[in-house]
Amino acid sequence: MALCITGMGRSGTSLVSSMLQSAGLDIGQRLLGAGTGNIKGHFEDLDFYEFHVAVLESQEIHPSGFTLQAESAIREPHLLHARELVRARRQGARPWGWKDPRSTLFLDFWQQSLPEANFLFLFRPPWDVVDSLFRRGDQVFRANPCFAVRVWIHYNRLLLAFHDRFPARCLCAHSYPAAQTPALLREALAQQFGLRLGAAAELYDEALLRRSDSSRWASLVRHHFPEAVEVYDELNERARQGPQGAALAGPAGQFLPVEDWACQDWLDRRVLEAQHRSRLEQLEKELTQTQADLVAARAHEGQLHDQLRQTEAALERAEVNLSETRTERAQIQARLVHAQATLSQTQADLSQARDDLARAEARSCASRELLARMESSKFWKLRKAWFRVRAVVRWAE
């Protein structure tokens, strides 16, 4: 089984697709990543996305798919691409599907190419979708903001027409109850298509699927585009006809009488102008103060530059002194090495002298002992007597 998830852009298709993916639906391996307005990802199968964009560009339609043109015939090269795309996806073992708002422009093509395909149509009030488009800032609506409402009508007219031709293959669901209570949507898919999925993760975030807090926008759409309100009511009616009845339908719009809001924008504009003037005056005062602070800062900067130059000069002197000190230290270290070498040599000489003195003292002691023995001997005594007699004889002569 295949499931096509589509609807007008900004209708909650990304959020619901992420929930169905968490429940076990294979929505593709190559998915379009996060971007402006979809910070958690688009959950669009890039194969289908690129196929749709290629077809639209071949027909000179903007790749965003924002158009009022009806579905056109698809040429042979793109038909081959689609067949290969379908063949590859059919090989999976799980229920599969894809999500792309542009699929709304290709409903007849896909129902013919994929007999096993069913279609989940998600919708959201036109005033909420338009508000979301304006907040995202799409360039295409800047010059023609009413085009956003007309595209919403066109897309959802296509969904309604296809639903009425193939009701058994379609399920309409308002994006708010579908996202807030995934179990309701899962049960509706099981009843309508026999698609059995697991429990879906609770991914709903009110900040990412906002509801307009102003009934004036709804009243504005109803007054100038009554067809949009009719289409929205018809979508809710198709949702109520589904297996979950009113559970997947949305609330009706809250509209104000024309006289209650017709001049409100006029008044609001003047109030905003007054607020902007007041804010501009405040900003001018802040600018004047900032300029004065800048002048003072520049004067202080000049002082800091002078101090910096003085510090740099002192640093240069310190570096010179440090260099001289290092040179003196090297010289002292060299003298110290020389003195240590001299001391070592002196100590060696002193040790040698002590050894020599000890040997000399030993020889002297031996000589004295020898002399004492000689003097005490008879020979020595006779010798001394001989020298005395000889002296007497010389004297007598």
Image (tube, helix red, strand yellow):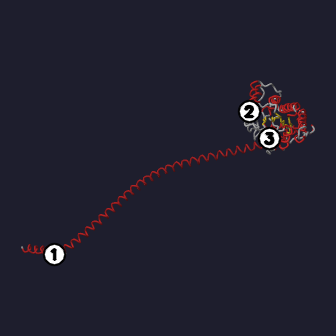
Q: Position of residue 292 (x, y in %)?
A: 70, 45
Label 2 secondary element: helix
CA gap, disc 2 and disc 3: 21 Å
Q: Look at 73% across and 43% down and name the residue there.
A: 288
Of the pair 242 and 124, the residue shown nearer to us:
242
Of the pair 70 and 375, the residue shown nearer to us:
70
Answer with mark 3 or mark 1, whichever residue precedes in sequence. Answer: 3
The crowding category of the residue bearing disc 1, from other C-alpha atoms within 10 Å (few below 14, some 14 to 19, many at least 20), is: few
Of the pair 287 and 135, the residue shown nearer to us:
135
Query: Which residue was labeled with disc 1?
Result: 378
Quadrant housing the N terminus: top right
Disc 3 to disc 1: CB gap under 8 Å: no
Amino acid carrying label 1: it is Lys
Q: Look at 80% across and 24% down and name the residue there.
A: 73
Label 3 secondary element: helix
Query: Which residue was labeled with disc 3?
Result: 20
Image quadrant in which you'd find residue 83? top right
Residue at the left extreme of this rendering: 397
Q: Position of residue 258 (x, y in %)?
A: 92, 37
Disc 1 to disc 2: CB gap under 8 Å: no
Foreground: disc 2 or disc 3: 2
Q: Position of residue 8 (x, y in %)?
A: 82, 34
The crowding category of the residue bearing disc 3, from other C-alpha atoms within 10 Å (few below 14, some 14 to 19, many at least 20), is: many
Tell me: 373 left or right of 231. Answer: left
Is 211 situated above or below 359? above
Q: Look at 67% across and 44% down and name the residue there.
A: 295
Residue 42 visible (yes or no): no
CA gap, disc 1 and disc 2: 139 Å
Q: How many marks?
A: 3
Answer with mark 1 or mark 2, whichever residue precedes in sequence. Answer: 2
Foreground: disc 1 or disc 2: 2
Query: Which residue was labeled with disc 2?
Result: 88
